[in-house]
Image (tube, grey):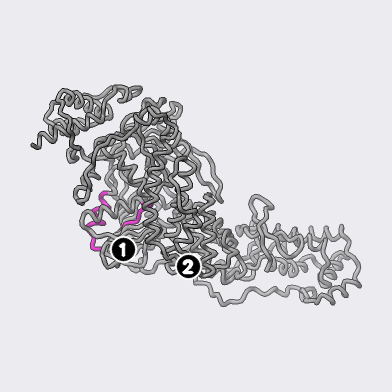
Amino acid sequence: MATLRTLSVSKQLTTTWCKRKYAFVCSTYKTGTSRGAENGNEIRKPQSDTRPNVSRKPYKIPQLYPTSSPIEWTEDEREKGLGDLEELDQDALKKILAQFTSNSEVWKLCVEHDIAYGMYRVTHRSFSAMCLNEKLSPDLHLLLLDLIDGSGDVVSLFPHFLKFSLELYPHLGCMDELKSIADLTSPAKWYPDARKKTRNIIIHTGPTNSGKTHQAMNKFLEAESAIYCCPLRLLAIEICNRSNDQGIPCDLRTGELITFANESNKPGSHMVCTVEMAIVEDHYNVAVIDEVQLIRDIDRGWAWTRAFLGLNADEIHLCGEESAIPLIKNLAKLTGDNVEVKEYERLTSLKILDEAVERWENILPGDCIICFSKESIFKVSTILNKLGIQTAIIYGHLPPATKIAMANKFNDPLDPCKVLVATDAVGMGVNLNIRRIVFHQLHKKVSIKNGQTAFRAISASMAKHIAGRAGRFKTIYPDGEVTTFLKSDIPLLHNTVGAKVPPIQSAGLKPTTEQMEMFSYQLPNATLEELLNTFEEMAKHDEKNFFMCELHQMKVLAGMIDDIGLPMRDRFHYSTAPIDIENELQCEVFVECAKKHYNEEPISLTWLTNLLGWPLKMPKTPSALRDLESIFGCLDNYLWFSKYYPDIYQGDKRVLAIQKELEIWIEDGLVLCLLRKLNNAEKIQLETHPLERRELTDKSDKLKHEKLEIEETELPLSTDENSTNQSQSISGMITFLKKGGISEKRLKKLSKKLDIDVTYSVPASQIGKHPRKEKVNIKNSIKNLGKILKDKKK
């Protein structure tokens, strides 16, 4: 087998080096219609619907022309035989090789032996270079002499060409088996337990804040056994906590964390999981798959496809966009399931504004500024902090607990932080009390293929999803608004949010561990990266309903560990790990862990912390904060591997304890990074008011706190006895709330509770009128409101 190392010959072909001189060969090749096939000369073997018989022997080289078939020569015989032969005329030989290239009979034979056009071009160049520059075997040398003299047919070269091709492309010898393994035309048949029953599929579709998820959640809680599949770990944790708070014991299963509701650590009747971790072998009465439109995602779509096709549940509730309905109905025909569609309307209004914010002084309480990079988030937050506007921050690489802490800070009606700066990560996750969404920009970097990215306008689906987060039913901001920071983006915002999301055409697929193991059996000397390349090009699927997901990350990770020597199954598991391939530290730890695994050495927490440079320091700069987030990600990856290899990764409980400490450091470091460019006066202006919060230990109190309804929230007590100041502060607080867009109903409830007469009036345009310009003392207002409530209770 050839010794392989990656080279670059053309933008569409990944080439490798063979032991033959001049043999640059293609390991990623197109298996589509060849030139001969386009001319109606395609001769292909029938596809097999059964599992591949891995014991079958590969093709033998056909003896098409017995008089000129390849002969095995020893080195001495070869040298002796060539010594008596005349040299080949190079110009005449070039003409013979050109005739061989254009011969139609040769094309037919290439198609029959699965040598596709792209592969043939590369192989022929190598074969021609060999004939022109190497000492040939006597039989091939004699054959070429005959062809130059005009006797014989150039087709007689094909056995030699085929032998050369088989040496460069070993998989040509077992194409039937490989084709059968890569046959993905009937993925519904992969799940026999689910196919034994007729499932009831209920699609809950509607915009954000329409109550569709609430309806599915009720079915989950009412069922005797149920599973809830979420797109994000943060959302899974929230759903799990909500279930446990309502008295329904619920297990949690994510890539990094597995917890059980009962004390015996045995699986219960209800489980919430990230969609990749869904267990399709168990039976459930009810299954919920959230954000089903992500079935079209180029990277993760396969997980939603697997969950939909494979979940063994009597009733499956799908929550998502209307665009997923046609595809789900098509897939249900393949599975034989019944489909019911329930459509919902938004519970509160959402207004797309015609005015942009334009100036940071125009940011208001309840605003959420959407950025599409971490750098933009820190830049915007620093600007707002300098203006005396406290901000909470949420972006993808933050630990879950830090995201929740930031969300609670923003949601808390008693906290002076009333502005959120976040990435599109807020589109799915914890509930947020957002009054207005402000798009800092409407373009973001998106993945295209093979790791390539492009800067493009966000899709209508993403824009609607993010915009819909403004306004939340039964909160201080029930009605939502959407705008942009730049005036020039307003027309694009209207066009994007107002556009109809096109129907989803197909669902994602990805090779399984078993398929890659069978590929490896047929090609034992190939690396996992080469196997993935070959599988991706050979895979055959129902293009009407399915597509192959992007395997770029898997290929990159496989390339890092292919030379370590792990078994194929382990290499495949490692290549599916959620490693950030652009993070140098995570990649380094990933490789070192694979090496220790290969040597069957336990990967202890002590070894890991030494590798990570323990002990750590509090991050005071964005770069130090990124380093700490990278370390947290390495610990997350450790937990992910511990679920597959508990005997190797043995410190999962201690890693969880360390992560809790890191979460505090990251949260505090985040504040330090935001304050580092402020002077002392600006820092004092941003100091959090020293209110003492009662501990929320009771479950019912936690639930009330999550709902964040003003009439159910206890204000803190105060010792301020100046009634005149109290009255002025109350007036100022009410003014502040009205500027933030509090509804008339909420204001009336608040005035009744405080026993004061407050007249509600719709505030004028808020552009250019920030509440801080009114110099409202929020701290004293809150304290004085608490004092009044205390006196009323007495």
Q: Residue furthest left?
A: 794
Q: Position of residue 791 (x, y in %)?
A: 11, 34
Going by the numbered disc 1, the residue's amino acid type is Ala
Badge 1 element: strand
Q: Nearer the viewer, residue 618 or 380?
A: 618
| Residue at image mark 2 | 602
Q: Position of residue 352 (x, y in %)?
A: 35, 31
Q: Nearer the viewer, residue 593 or 72?
A: 593
The answer to whether any part of residue 325 appears in the image is: no
Kindly identify the residue that appears in the image at 71 percent across and 63 percent down.
18
In the picture, the disc for residue 313 is 1
Residue 225 magenta-highlighted: yes
Residue 656 magenta-highlighted: no
Residue range highlighted in magenta: 214-233
Q: Position of residue 700 (x, y in %)?
A: 19, 50
Kindly identify the residue that appears in the image at 34 percent across and 52 percent down.
290
Specify the quadrant that holds the N terminus. Answer: bottom right
Q: Is residue 298 above or below residue 40?
A: above
The answer to whether any part of residue 682 appears in the image is: yes
**Left of 618 or right of it: where is 711?**
left
Kindly identify the residue that appears in the image at 14 percent across and 32 percent down.
788
Q: Position of residue 718 (x, y in %)?
A: 18, 34
Which image quarter: residue 677?
top left
Q: Nearer the viewer, residue 572 or 55?
A: 572
Earlier-in-chain disc, 2 versus 1: 1
Q: Nearer the viewer, residue 285 or 662?
A: 662
In the picture, the disc for residue 218 is none
Badge 2 element: loop
